Amino acid sequence: MQFLRKLVQCWTNTISEIKKPVVVMAHYHIGQIVQLKKPHPCGSDRWQIIRVGMDFRIKCMNCGRSVLIPRTRFERRVKQIIAGEV
Ligand SMILES: [Zn+2]
Protein backbone atom coordinates (compact mmCIF):
# COMPACT_ATOMS: atom_id res chain seq x y z
CA MET A 1 0.00 0.00 0.00
CA GLN A 2 2.83 2.29 0.92
CA PHE A 3 4.50 1.45 -2.36
CA LEU A 4 1.34 2.28 -4.28
CA ARG A 5 1.00 5.61 -2.51
CA LYS A 6 4.59 6.42 -3.35
CA LEU A 7 3.97 5.50 -6.97
CA VAL A 8 0.92 7.75 -7.15
CA GLN A 9 2.88 10.56 -5.50
CA CYS A 10 5.64 10.16 -8.03
CA TRP A 11 3.16 10.12 -10.87
CA THR A 12 1.43 13.26 -9.60
CA ASN A 13 4.78 15.01 -9.37
CA THR A 14 5.55 14.06 -12.95
CA ILE A 15 2.23 15.45 -14.15
CA SER A 16 2.67 18.75 -12.31
CA GLU A 17 6.15 18.92 -13.82
CA ILE A 18 4.72 18.60 -17.31
CA LYS A 19 2.00 21.15 -16.63
CA LYS A 20 4.54 23.82 -15.71
CA PRO A 21 4.52 26.56 -18.31
CA VAL A 22 7.56 26.55 -20.51
CA VAL A 23 9.23 29.92 -20.36
CA VAL A 24 10.65 30.84 -23.71
CA MET A 25 13.11 33.64 -23.35
CA ALA A 26 13.26 35.50 -26.60
CA HIS A 27 16.42 37.44 -27.08
CA TYR A 28 15.86 41.07 -27.74
CA HIS A 29 18.65 43.41 -28.56
CA ILE A 30 19.09 47.13 -28.82
CA GLY A 31 18.51 48.19 -32.40
CA GLN A 32 16.00 45.51 -33.27
CA ILE A 33 12.86 46.60 -35.01
CA VAL A 34 9.69 44.89 -33.87
CA GLN A 35 6.07 44.94 -34.89
CA LEU A 36 3.65 45.25 -31.99
CA LYS A 37 0.05 44.08 -31.88
CA LYS A 38 -1.06 47.49 -30.71
CA PRO A 39 -0.03 50.40 -32.91
CA HIS A 40 1.05 53.81 -31.64
CA PRO A 41 -1.63 56.52 -31.80
CA CYS A 42 0.32 57.94 -34.77
CA GLY A 43 -0.58 54.80 -36.73
CA SER A 44 2.76 53.02 -36.86
CA ASP A 45 3.19 49.55 -35.35
CA ARG A 46 6.96 49.45 -35.91
CA TRP A 47 9.19 50.12 -32.96
CA GLN A 48 12.92 50.09 -32.43
CA ILE A 49 14.35 48.78 -29.18
CA ILE A 50 16.62 51.39 -27.66
CA ARG A 51 17.04 49.95 -24.16
CA VAL A 52 16.65 46.47 -22.66
CA GLY A 53 16.42 45.34 -19.06
CA MET A 54 13.57 44.96 -16.60
CA ASP A 55 11.90 47.64 -18.65
CA PHE A 56 12.26 48.12 -22.35
CA ARG A 57 12.51 51.48 -24.02
CA ILE A 58 11.13 51.42 -27.50
CA LYS A 59 11.02 54.18 -30.06
CA CYS A 60 8.24 54.62 -32.57
CA MET A 61 9.67 54.33 -36.08
CA ASN A 62 7.20 56.84 -37.43
CA CYS A 63 7.08 59.76 -35.02
CA GLY A 64 10.24 59.01 -33.03
CA ARG A 65 8.60 59.12 -29.63
CA SER A 66 10.00 56.69 -27.06
CA VAL A 67 8.01 54.72 -24.52
CA LEU A 68 9.12 52.83 -21.41
CA ILE A 69 7.34 49.51 -21.14
CA PRO A 70 7.76 46.62 -18.66
CA ARG A 71 9.48 43.61 -20.23
CA THR A 72 6.53 41.26 -19.63
CA ARG A 73 4.08 43.61 -21.30
CA PHE A 74 6.46 44.22 -24.18
CA GLU A 75 6.87 40.47 -24.78
CA ARG A 76 3.12 39.99 -24.82
CA ARG A 77 2.69 42.78 -27.34
CA VAL A 78 5.33 41.75 -29.83
CA LYS A 79 3.87 40.34 -33.00
CA GLN A 80 7.13 39.76 -34.81
CA ILE A 81 10.71 40.86 -35.05
CA ILE A 82 11.15 42.66 -38.34
CA ALA A 83 14.84 43.48 -38.40
CA GLY A 84 17.94 42.88 -36.34
CA GLU A 85 19.68 39.71 -35.20
CA VAL A 86 17.61 37.34 -33.07
ZN1 LIG B 1 4.35 57.12 -33.19
Image (spheres, helix red, strand yellow):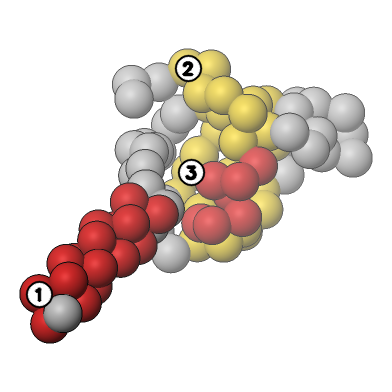
Residue 12 position within the rendered picture, expressed as x and y whole percent measured from the top left: 30, 65
Question: Residue lying farthest left?
Answer: 3
Q: Tag 3, which secondary structure?
A: strand
Amino acid type for the residue under numbered disc 1? Phe
Residue 4 position within the rendered picture, expressed as x and y whole percent measured from the top left: 17, 71
Q: Quadrant of residue 53?
A: bottom left
**Distance between mark 1 and mark 3 Cα atoms:** 57 Å
**Distance between mark 2 and mark 1 Cα atoms:** 56 Å
Q: Mark 1 touching mark 3, by CB under 8 A?
A: no
The residue positioned 37% from the left and 48% from the top of the image is: 22
- Of label 3 and label 2, which has the lower sequence position? 3
Q: Mark 2 touching mark 1, by CB under 8 A?
A: no
Left or right of residue 43, residue 29 in this image? left
4 lies above or below 28: below
- Of label 1 and label 3, which has the lower sequence position? 1
Q: Tag 1, which secondary structure?
A: helix
Q: Quadrant of residue 29?
A: top left
Q: Which residue is mark 2?
A: 83
